[in-house]
Amino acid sequence: MQYKQLGNTDLQLSILGYGASPLGSVFQDIKESEGIRTVHTALDQGINYIDCSPYYGLTKAETVLGKALKGVNRDRYILSTKAGRYGPDFDDFDMSPQRIQSSLEESLVRLGVDELDMFLLHDIEFVDLEQVIHESLPYLDRLKKAGKIRYFGITGYPLKSFQQVVEQYDIDCVLSYCRYALHDDSLTQLMPLLKEKGVGLINASPTAMGLLTKRGAPDWHPAAQELIDCCRAAEAVCLRYGVDLTQVAMQYAVHHQAISSTLVGTANPINLLNNIEWIKEPINAELVLEIKTLFDTCAETVWVSGRSEN
Ligand code: NAD
């Protein structure tokens, strides 16, 4: 496993990180024991970065992750969780300092740890960015100075809201999802700004939340049918080359030099081991070009998330 520094922090993240949302049965029902085994497999294979949120399975993912981490030496993993999002709807968001404070205390109990390495505002595009910049982030800054968290940052989907916040407030990291994967690599537009500001970059969802897997997207996936069809066409191209679409998706997402870690989610140890093996192999540039050309013809590679002004 390779490790990379995250922005100006002193964190060295494994280039493949473990995303714990599937532990909350977000994609399908899981067997808890298998989910726990997947976390242990990740750690045994050198993955040292784990991400979670109270939103995943409405606290279930944090609870299962806490069970998995029980008895594991705290210096074996770098842990992030989030605050601000507690359900799917606009009124499930609360990024006030009071809620951030109680959310942190509740997450620490569920996860069974005393301290977080990173604390992130979950999906900032759903709230007023003025509140994020003038209330929520200053509060995270206070928590950092008080030693309750080591670093803080933001997560979300639209690149515009990241830019707006990063230009106005000094944060440690950004967690972006579905923006550097086979179907969409627009995250590259944000990289120069993040580099200039010393903000670390975490890339999530290399399979675009299941789109780039054999099973395909879950029912709640926001992708338009045109993109879903394009993914199936990409799968056919991969079959012609004798490789798995998910294999190429993993290889593509992980190796950008500006990205410190790419978070993949699974509650299946075999999937995780495959991902770890795949990213060691060289990518087939000719195949990637063919797939990228296919996605270039698909008009609907992105979707809307959050408030229209963000
Ligand atoms: P992902 O692209 O990692 O896809 C997960 C899906 O792919 C699951 O259904 C999983 O079973 C499947 N999968 C993984 N490896 C596979 C393999 N080898 N073969 C077949 N199927 C495989 O999407 P994700 O889980 O949404 O993202 C990863 C993590 O990133 C999340 O768990 C979360 O921690 C983080 N994330 C954060 C945000 C945010 O903060 N807003 C958004 C998305 C993701």
Image: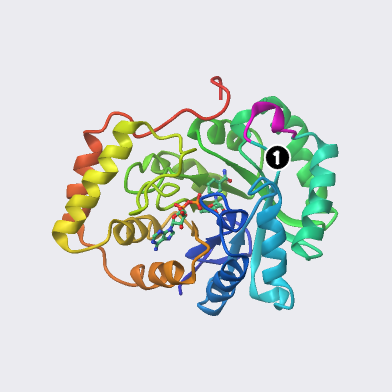
Residue located at (59% from left, 31% from top): 125
Total tally of numbered discs in the picture: 1
Q: Is residue 102 above or below residue 225?
A: below
Residue located at (37% from left, 48% from top): 216
Name the quadrant containing residue 96.
Answer: top right
- Using the image as rendered, state which of residue 54 and residue 48 is in the foreground: 54
The C terminus, quarter of image:
top right
Position of residue 170 measured from the top left corner of the image (x, y, whole percent): 66, 42
Q: Is residue 261 above or below residue 208?
A: below
Position of residue 204 measured from the top left corner of the image (x, y, whole percent): 49, 51
User: Is 91 covered by the magenta stretch?
Assistant: yes
Q: Which amino acid, by three-letter code, is at mark 1?
A: Tyr
Report crowding for label 1: few under 14, some 14 to 19, many 20 or more residues within 10 A (C-alpha).
many
Report which residue position mark 1 lands on: 86
Taking 62 as reference, is 280 left or right?
Answer: left
- Outermost residue on the top side: it is 309
Taking 278 as reference, is 37 left or right?
Answer: right
User: Is 235 covered by the magenta stretch?
Assistant: no
User: Magenta region: which residues?
Assistant: 88-94
Position of residue 194 measured from the top left corner of the image (x, y, whole percent): 52, 45
Look at the numbered disc 1 and give the secondary structure of its residue: loop
Name the quadrant containing residue 66.
Answer: bottom right
Position of residue 7 measured from the top left corner of the image (x, y, whole percent): 56, 55
